[in-house]
Amino acid sequence: MTDKIQTDSGVNDVLTALESPTAECLSLGAYSVGATATDALIAVKGFNKYMDFVSTFRTSSDWKADFTNTYGMSPDEFYLKLAPYLRARLN
């Protein structure tokens, strides 16, 4: 996984794989990557904002739109912003 996150496109590939959990996502470090992404979201926008996003899961089937509405950026934009932090934390 650490080889894969050395490029922005590799980070995008890893995070996109985690959107639909499969056996592949486990080999890409799903828990570490997911925890680091969650840590970044909470650090930047706060726990309450994160919980606002998570609370949409009960009533919505479009998490990407909910993410965009909550954070003001698409998941893909977030993935690119997250890439340097992910590399720093997981290398």
Image (cartoon, helix red, strand yellow):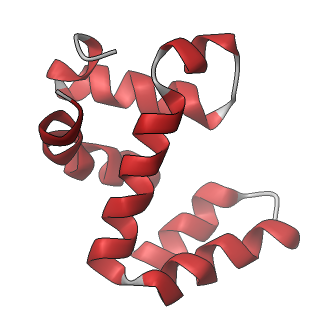
Quarter placement of the C terminus = top left
Residue at image x 27%, y 75%? 44
Figure check: 48 above or below 16: below
**Residue 30 % position (x, y):** 52, 30
Count every numbered label the image shows and give the total.
0
The foreground one among 10 and 90 is 90
The foreground one among 76 and 46 is 46
Find the residue positioned furthest to the bottom.
48
Figure check: 74 above or below 88: below
Residue at image x 15%, y 20%? 6
**Residue 72 % position (x, y):** 39, 75
**Residue 73 % position (x, y):** 37, 65
Horizontal side of 55 relative to 31 (left or right) equals: right
Residue at image x 46%, y 24%? 29
Residue at image x 33%, y 45%? 79
**Residue 12 % position (x, y):** 35, 30
Residue 41 visible, this angle? yes
Find the residue positioned furthest to the right.
59
Which quarter of the figure has residue 74? bottom left
Figure check: 63 above or below 69: above
Residue 73 visible, this angle? no
Horizontal side of 22 relative to 67 (left or right) equals: right
Quarter placement of the N terminus = top left
Figure check: 48 above or below 42: below
